[in-house]
Image (spheres, rainbow, N blue to C red):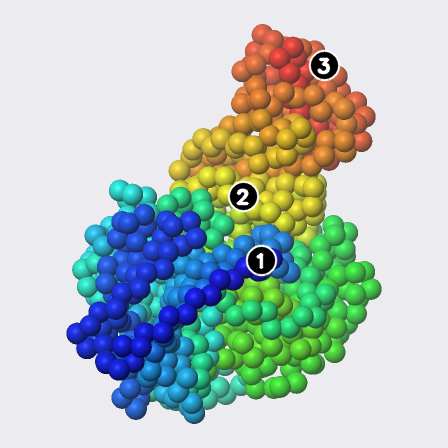
Amino acid sequence: MKNRCLTTFCLLMILLYPAHGIEEVFEVSSPNDALKIKVSISDAIYYEVFHKNMALIIPSKISMTLEDGRIIGLNATIKDTERENVSEKIPLLFGKYTSLDNTYHELSIHFNEGYSLIVRAYDEGVAYRFATELGDTVIVKSEEANFNFAGSPTVWFPEADALMRSWERSYQYYSSIREIGAGKFSITPAMFSYPQSGIRVVIAESDQTDYPGMYVQPSGENSVAGKWAHYPKTVSDPENMYAYQRVLERHDYLAVTSGDRSYPWRVIIVSSLDKDLLNNDLIFKLAKEQQFTNTQWIKPGRSAWEWWHDGILEGVDIPSGPGNMTFEVYKYYIDFAAKYGLEYLTLDAGYNTSVRQVCNYAASVGVGVFVWDYINLPVWNPNRITEMKNNGAVGMKVDLIERDDQVAMNWIEKLAKDCADREMMLVLHGCPKPSGLQRAYPNIVNFEAVRGAECNKWDMTANPDYHLQFIFIRMLAGPLDYTPGSMRNVNRSSFSTIANGIPMSMGTRSHELAMYILFDQPLAYLCDSPVEYPKYPDIMNFLSKTPTVWEQTIPLAGEVGAFAAIAKRHGKEWFVGAMTNWSARTIEIDFSFLPADSSYTAEIYRDTEQSARDAKSYACETIIVTNQSKVTFELASGGGVAMRLFDPAGVTAEVNDFDSNRFQFDVVVYPDNNRRDLNIKSEMAYDMITVYDLKGVVMIKNPYNKATNHQKLNIGSLKDGAYIVQLEGRNGNHAVKFIK
């Protein structure tokens, strides 16, 4: 339902007199009255931002300068103003919800000089943009966007490279803006924090159409200002279609564009609770509306993928690895995807086989194919996307854009439109950070602009500390192309880079699984080998049942750079993910988000006592929870927990009667290295130990030895596979899944 209230004020006196020396002040408050943006107009235009009357941004000047000398925002005279209160729903094709609440207050100030300033206040933040009605074509010489902070905030600074070629940036933490070195600047979003009040302020942008991307750089002791890539003058002439189109020289202006247009939103996100940043969709809400209606062919899902592990199929009697990415190799991946219900395969860089042959076989078993491509190919060849479509691909993964000037940003939007026209999905890799384009073109399922799993090949930047930074900052801009799923989990001290071959990943196994719930990734990759996953039937079962899009999302807890926990619903099932940085910690999951008078089976993947030493160690356990349950988990360094909550009617009665309210995970179960003995450690005494196979057949039943809290159960008679061990006692039962 859409609700709009419109008021127009004609300021007749100001039509007659310029604003020199006269200050006009306008205020726009958020619907919940917590935020306020104040605009002051005199010789220039300034804005301020307040949270509950506490100044966050003090008067900051904004303007745009055109090449013909006109300055938008200088000596402006007001023609009239409009106020609008909007309350509506944005239906979503996919994402974290089925729809978004889009409620805001808006002020439009129209000037006699042929332009307007539009200001909006949401509960999640504020934003402003310029719009012009100047006719013809204009050249934007420069833009002035200042952010003058009240006090001295700390900074999470994703420092940019000097040539503006990369958006996969690590975060540098500074205790103040003045600590940032001269000449340094960052990509956006960038975060500024007021430790005493706990307020976070994030500078970002939205609706970056036909315009370069915004960076920020220090401009004073407590100030930053916008910075943009200038318009390309000369570009390297690629000797082949795979060579870069690198900018060698730039003009002294930003953009050549229509005189009648709206410019990108300058966005200021404000949050008093860190966890709320996990649910902040302001950039999406401000973005251009969906541009097409035929969307039934857009289907997010999960993809098998060969590039991270170099396509090496260990122990398989097929030549594999670099140089051997043949049809037979891809057939193995496709069969794996089909067996476990994965919707897609991605052919990444380095394939040497017929795309059509791979796509035809994949289609015959119900698997779609994304095909990697270099940005030059669709830019140079207008028929490239059609060729891929005719080969049977359902989507493209376009890589190595490495520019965000006006020309490159127009490449990206045209690419999205051309793919949509041909009913092709799109993954953008080696790309600028998102700024809401996926709202206009929902066929864009992922953007990289993150230090993803690929970085494990060459450095240590994709680590648990970083994971707990970018989900609160970078993920505000849009979905990721992180590509999780490593089963080669190690702790920090054991990690080393492997550029060629199968790399490692940092963080525990449970931390890795939590990524599938915490990370926004409509196309979720399984980066490891199809040979590796079947070694862990419980994990493969979890991954095959974990969706990539959701109907409801509830942040449970979080602190920027430290930890996060979130619950997401798909249909009748809930999924909970939590992770920590390199600091071990205890976290409590409160299940009050569940419906009343219902019980759920919680299939839990968590760290064990061994995870601090062996990151691959995890426990898979099943308990019953209700909305009254609160369960405490011990997260190892770089650890996590992942859960699937479903209707308990689908599990055997033997594991249905556990009292989760008394549960504190005092039991650790793991096989010895010789896989003949099952170690059981518990501070609580039980009466009986029973081992079931996954069909519920009793395999072993022994009395519990109450004389020791560490006992061994001989499992030498069991075949390799997954089993459930149940501990039964007067104080409750405890069921744990283990792999022999």
Say whether residue 266 is left or right of residue 85.
Answer: left
- Is label 3 in a helix, a strand or a loop? strand
- In the image, residue 718 above or below residue 256: above
The kind of residue tagged 1 is Lys
Please tell me how crowded label 2 is: few (under 14), some (14-19), or many (20+) other residues with Cα within 10 Å: some
The kind of residue tagged 2 is Ile
Residue 19, quarter of the rendered image: bottom left
Q: Which mark is residue 554?
A: 2
Query: Which residue is label 3 attached to?
Result: 702
- In the image, residue 6 above or below residue 668: below
**Given this view, does label 1 or label 2 mark the residue nearer the observer?**
1
Query: Which residue is label 1 attached to?
Result: 89
**Which residue shows up at 59% across the image and 81% down it?**
378
- Gap between marks 1 and 2, in whole Å? 18 Å
Front residue of 539 and 481: 481
Q: Is residue 634 visible?
A: yes
Q: Position of residue 481 (x, y in %)?
A: 54, 60
Say whether residue 687 is left or right of residue 356.
Answer: left
The kind of residue tagged 3 is Asn
Do tag 2 and tag 3 residues touch (Cβ < 8 Å)? no
